[in-house]
Image (tube, grey):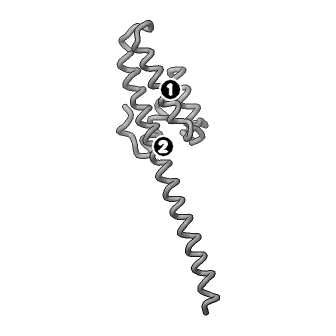
Amino acid sequence: MLKAVVPVLALVAVAAGCSSSEGKDEERLTAQRENYCTQLGAWQKARNAAGTDTPASSGYDDVEAVAQDAFLAMRPLRDEPVGGGRTLGEATVAAMNNSDSEAEGRVVQYCGDVGFETLTR
């Protein structure tokens, strides 16, 4: 009987280790998504605040700095799909570098879909 119990206990230990690892991976993914959506919202606020400034003003430098933070936050998530055949990385670049409102809508929708809609405009 002891010979039958040992393999079962080993299997239970392996399964428990996997679910613990999976839980940590899910927590990390959730934290990465929250960070990205927070940075996206900060970029939107900075961009909107600088919208009344002239291009030579420091407001645009502030927007670029905040955009850099959003790009860094996006990196671990860049391959996540956001619809329209685009990834989060592609849509973020298009929204921030090309003023693509459709792309911006997609990344805002992404934040809504992952539960962080209140972090964006």
The x, y position of residue 22, in whole percent, is: 53, 59
Q: Residue at point 42% right, 19% down?
A: 62
Disc 2 versus disc 1: distance between alpha carbons? 16 Å
In the image, taking residue 87 as reference, residue 50 lies left or right, namely left
Mark 1 = which residue?
A: 68
Tell me the number on the disc at residue 57: none
Marks 2 and 1 close (CB-CB < 8 Å): no
Quarter of the rendering containing residue 52: top left
Residue 49 image point, x, y percent? 35, 19
- Please give left or right for residue 12 compared with residue 115 in the image: right
Q: Residues within 10 Å of mark 1 (few under 14, many from 20)?
A: some
Q: Residue at x 48, y 25 (%)?
A: 67
Q: Residue at x 45, y 44 (%)?
A: 113
Q: Position of residue 15 (x, y in %)?
A: 56, 70
Closer to the camera in the image, 63 or 9 = 9
Q: Name the residue located 56 percent from the left edge and 75 percent from the top edge.
A: 12
Label 1 SS = helix
Which residue bears the numbered disc 2?
A: 32
Whether 114 is drawn above or below 13: the answer is above
Query: Looking at this view, is 32 or 119 the one in front?
Result: 32
Mark 2 belongs to which amino acid? Gln
**Vertical placement of residue 66 versus 85, above or below:** above
Q: How many numbered markers are drawn? A: 2
The reply, left or right, for residue 49 in relation to residue 114 is left
Q: Quarter of the image containing the N terminus? A: bottom right
At label 1, the amino acid type is Gln
**Label 2 crowd (10 A; few <14 / some 14-19 / many >=20):** some
- Which element type, helix, strand or loop, lies under badge 2? helix
Q: In the rendered view of the protein, which quadrant contains the C terminus?
A: top left
